Amino acid sequence: MKYTEGPEIRDTKAPSGPVEERWEKRKFGAKLVNPANKRKLNVIVIGTGLAGGSAAATLGELGYNVKSFCYQDTPRRAHSIAAQGGINAAKNYRGDGDSIYRLFYDTVKGGDFRARESNVYRLAQVSVNIIDQAVAQGVPFAREYGGLLDTRSFGGAQVSRTFYARGQTGQQLLLGAYQALERQIAAGTVEMHTRHEMLDLIISDGRARGVIVRDMVSGEIERHLADAVVLASGGYGNVFFLSTNAKGCNTTAIWRAHERGAYFANPCYTQIHPTCIPVSGEYQSKLTLMSESLRNDGRVWVPLRKNDDRAPGDIPEEERDYYLERIYPAFGNLVPRDIASRAAKNVCDEGRGVGPGGLGVYLDFRDAINRLGRDAVEKKYGNLFEMYERITGENPYDVPMRIYPAVHYTMGGLWVDYDLQSSIPGLFVVGEANFSDHGANRLGASALMQGLADGYFVLPTTLGDYLAAGPFGDVDEEAVAEAEIRVRNKIDRLLSVNGTRTPDSFHRELGKLMWDYCGMERTEESLRKALERIPELRAEFWQNVKVSGTAEELNQVLEKAGRVADFFDLAELMCLDALIRTESCGGHFRAESQDADGEALRDDENFAHVSAWEFSPDGPVLHKEALEYEYVKMTQRSYK
């Protein structure tokens, strides 16, 4: 795949000065919109997860006219509901040394020094407000005996800063945002459109001015116009087919925006979660996450001996290898996700994995049950244990869980500046759909933090600064018509192929190719193989995909086909980005770039930058944004 290099880019919105003062400086410098003018301004929000739901609710509360879209039958079904373990915040309720600065430091280090300092410090600052907001909404966080909010530890930190609601934190936080959204729907400031999928972005006079959507029930193609568009459509982990994401999660909204001119940043940065239920067979269509919070009390181990097929209870203590505790004594089982995932892969590659195919390691709660009692463990993790037993038929109170790494989160996404605005004026991107806060690896419990920080606290300020210059006049009718024609032509093309293979069969093949060649470990050879095979498979897709039904009805096969077509294009860019980045950093592990201990070896001289890709019919154009560190010194990451 050919590419060219374009001019370097900069984030011109990030203020200068002491990092702890930058957000306050930006807020004060932002233009305000008076209440009467807000009623004249229209905003479209795509997605109703934590980022999109909180953004739409807050913008509606401020007085803007908001249109909210989701492809589910209710905003409550957004994938944020699946998050389990918790949400980080620098409250320091435990008095164990936490602070805003420490959360900032841990996040920059956890991202392997590939995130912006300004964005990450703001995230740490805002985190303390999120908890107060959620508590005021009635989110039932766990509490200690004295009534104070409880916290637990997560990977990549040596303090206890993760607030949680058993293993249902995402669900409870989403219900808080949902009730705030429903309040605005009832008040008339938010107009809700469920079962609608965004299929293109309308650009008029160089600004994002609306979207083309498909009513997924009737098949009707609709045009919706606004003064600004906010994308909160989540990540693209389902490019791997098997992942912990809901089956509906896709890249279409951000990819179509990329085709209209929004830069796509760091697409190769994907997160492998170490604590998932292993694959059980070819029939599987998704994987199930077991919360990282389980590593607080569960101990990860494998047999010392290769090919040891004894039951775990028959393996004595001296013949077990608690490898994370052995290799990383300072952090033990609470090392970051990328570290834990690669360590699990390594012991399985050595032949010491457990379960079918040797692709698993044990997560053992025996010691915790003996120390705390079964009741205490059940109060913390009961719903997770029940979920595990329902899926595997094994009781984790009696036998250790079996876990293995799986695709979970994507740190890459549309490029945004400090204001969360993309390279297209008027197009703002929040939550996992943007690239901004996590670098090359996300620490556990930081996704919920970023989504709510963006939606409740950051976007309402920065979007207001943009809208202060609005309304922006009439939208060019020709631009709207062109966007609608593009959508209709793509749908017609999919329906006209009438081949013999289902979209799912192509998706599964693409996903396996991506996992094998651009998964936990990448090499130049594997990435070049992927870049040869993806165009061939994509060509076969457009020649042989079978899309039954019509466009004028509920047609889930058509929906899947459109999403898979976008995954092909994204997959190619991911592999190109991974091939060019000849270093290892965070979740991007190039086998050619590791130290003597097998740890990721960065190349700060050549790759301390964001890779922002511009779409072009002649091949992608790479723009680099240099990353500068004033407060956290770039060093080789160590959790030992």
Image: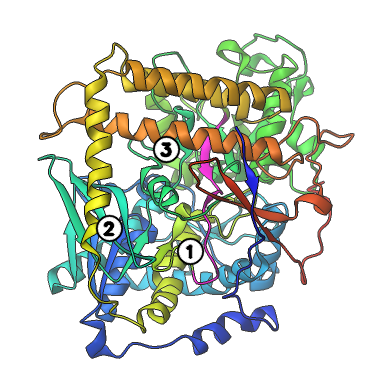
Residue type at mark 3: give it: Asn
Mark nearest the camera among 3 and 2 is 2
Tag 1 residue = 145
Q: Decide: few, some or many residues near mark 3? Use Cα within 10 Å; few <14, some 14-19, many ≥20.
A: many
Residue type at mark 2: give it: Ala
Q: Is residue 409 magenta?
A: yes
Tag 3 residue = 245
Residue 392 visible (yes or no)? no
Helix, strand or loop status at disc 1: loop
| Magenta range | 405-419
Q: Please name whichever residue, 618 or 640, is drawn nearer the observer in this view of the structure.
A: 618
At 36% from the left and 37% from the top, the residue drawn is 246
**The N terminus appears in which quarter of the rendering?**
top right
Instruction: Check whether the beta carbons of the residues at disc 2 and disc 1 lie within 8 A of each other.
Output: no
Q: Residue 566, located in which quarter of the rendered image?
A: top left
Q: How is the image coloured?
A: rainbow
Q: Is residue 74 magenta?
A: no
Helix, strand or loop status at disc 2: helix
Distance CA(mark 1)–CA(mark 3): 35 Å
**Mark number displayed over residue 479:** 2
Residue 116 visible (yes or no)? yes
Distance CA(mark 3)–CA(mark 2): 34 Å
| Percent x, y of residue 331 | 74, 48
